[in-house]
Image (tube, rainbow, N blue to C red):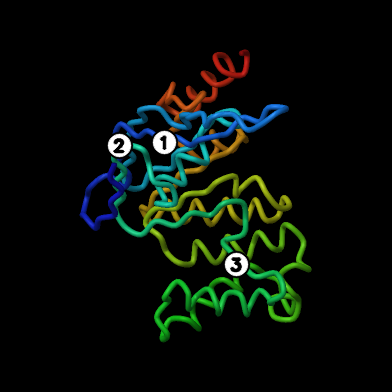
Amino acid sequence: MEVVSVELKDKPSIIVEALNISYYSKPKTIIRMGAPIEIQALKNISFRINKGECVAVLGKNGAGKSTLLEAIGGHIRPKSGTVITNGKVYTLKGANPGLIPHLSAKDNIIMMANVYAVPKDERESFLDSVEKFCELGNAFSDRDYSALSTGMAGRVGFGFTTSLNPQVLLMDETLGVGDEEFRKKAEVKAMDFMKKGETIMISTHSLNLAKKMCTRAIVLHEGNLVFDGSSSDAVQYYLEEIIKT
């Protein structure tokens, strides 16, 4: 097993080779717990993603989408295989990158900027960038994060993560949360991110979003990679070969 982050010019942003991930589950019986059962979440997954690509990850619940992104982001230790990423990688699951409910959005961003080691001389401009994206007015500094609506909270999390300027951005259902206004703003910022030549992987149940934002998509089914091609062809395959089952 190997998970590596490198800084190599003109190399693929993500390389996944023969990736296997398992976890153990203890079945419950009426009398006692049964022996642990190994469940394979991902089975011998291999693909490469080049710099500047936006790739959707499609599949039913339990197909392995979140597990794959967590492995690429370095949050899960694979059983075997190799994951290599080129540049800074950040993962945004849902819309909250770990913000504290009883702090304001502004205080959260200041704290998180310190946690993520944003240089001191850049923190003011970093804060301005996030605040500009959020467009929350006084609520940005006066209202607890927990008191914000889902859409408003989504702007804070998404604005923070993308302002970190990752070379690889992994989004797990991020663009499916929040209100319509948030989704539109997030899509625009994600498109701007791609125009800079950075790489995005999006796990999503929205087939329209996959076709709209991504030129390529992979389809997972029961832990297997069953399709890798254009987003439109991937959506067609998913509807005809996976959903029908």
Residue 237: percent from left, percent from top: 51, 18
Residue 169: percent from left, percent from top: 45, 53
Instruction: Give the quarter of the image for residue 26.
Output: top right
Q: Residue at x 43, y 33 (%)?
A: 216
Q: Residue at x 44, y 57 (%)?
A: 90
**Is disc 3 surrounded by few (<14), some (14 to 19) or many (20+) residues within 10 Å?**
some
* Contact, mark 3 vs mark 2 (Cβ under 8 Å): no
Q: Is residue 207 left or right of residue 230?
A: right
Residue 151: percent from left, percent from top: 72, 57
**Is disc 2 surrounded by few (<14), some (14 to 19) or many (20+) residues within 10 Å?**
some
Q: Quadrant of the N terminus?
A: top left
Residue occupied by mark 1: 21
Give me the C-alpha separation between circle 3 and circle 2.
Answer: 39 Å
Q: Earlier in the sequence, mark 2 or mark 1?
A: 1
Q: Is residue 82 above or below residue 99?
A: above
Residue occupied by mark 3: 133
Q: Nearer the viewer, mark 1 or mark 3?
A: 1
Q: Give the residue furthest to the front.
A: 31
Q: Is residue 104 above or below residue 42?
A: below
Instruction: Give the quarter of the image for residue 17.
Output: top left
Q: Is residue 220 left or right of residue 60?
A: left
Give me the C-alpha separation between circle 2 and circle 1.
Answer: 9 Å
Q: Residue at x 62, y 56 (%)?
A: 95
Of 19 and 113, the residue lying toward us: 19
Q: Is residue 229 left or right of residue 15?
A: right
Q: Earlier in the sequence, mark 3 or mark 2?
A: 2
Mark number for residue 81?
2
Which amino acid lies under the numbered mark 1 shown in the image of this protein? Ile
Q: Earlier in the sequence, mark 1 or mark 3?
A: 1
Q: Give the residue furthest to the bottom.
A: 121
